[in-house]
Image (tube, grey):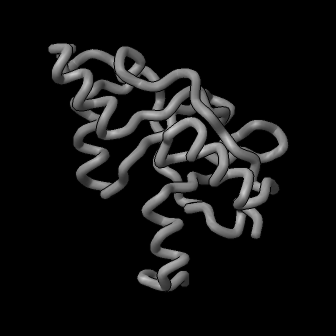
Amino acid sequence: MRVGDLMVKEVATIRQDTSIEEVIKTFYNKRVGSLIITDEEGKCKGILTHTDVFRGIVKKIPFDSSVEKVMSKNVITVSENDSFSKARELMCRHRVRHLPVTDMKGCTVGVLSIRHIFDEISGFKKRA
C-alpha cells in the first residue's frame, strides 16, 4: 500500500510567522493534532504539534510570538509514492506521530498520522 492511499489530503497548513495564539485557535477549530508549516510554494518548512505548543507554554514563550519559536524545523517527510512500510519505519525510528507527505516537487500534499492509520486499519472511520 502506498502512502498516498492512506494520507489525509486536506492538510492544515500555516506560515511560520503565524502567532502561537492563532495556532491554538486553529488546532481547536480544525480539530487536528498537527499543522504543517509551508512556504509560499507549498514546501514543508516544519511541523507543529500540540506537544510543541505545550513545550512553548512551559518555556513561557509569549502567545504573540511566531510559531517559528516552537515548531520542529528538522521535519521528517515521506513521499506520496513511498510504501506504507517505509512510512511506518520512519515513524517508529524517529518516534513521530505525524509525517508530512510531499509530491515529487517537494510540495506538501497531505499528512500521515498514527490516528488516521489506526482508523483506517480498524475500520473505525469509513473513507468517503
Q: Quadrant of residue 67?
A: top left
Query: Compared to 75, does 79 lie above or below?
Result: below
Q: Residue at x 37, y 38 (%)?
A: 49
Residue 2: % across, % down = 76, 64
Comparing 117 with 95, the one in front is 95
Comparing 41 with 11, the one in front is 11
Is 13 left or right of 82, judged from the image as shown? Answer: left
In which quadrant of the rendered image does the N terminus lie? bottom right
Numbered-mark total: 0
Is 3 left or right of 124, judged from the image as shown? Answer: right
Query: Compared to 47, does 72 lie above or below?
Result: above
Residue 104: % across, % down = 84, 43
Q: Quadrant of residue 64?
A: top left
In which quadrant of the rendered image does the C terminus lie? bottom right
Q: Residue at x 62, y 34 (%)?
A: 76
Residue 98: % across, % down = 50, 47
Residue 119: % across, % down = 46, 74
Q: Residue at x 44, y 42 (%)?
A: 35
Q: Residue at x 30, y 25 (%)?
A: 19
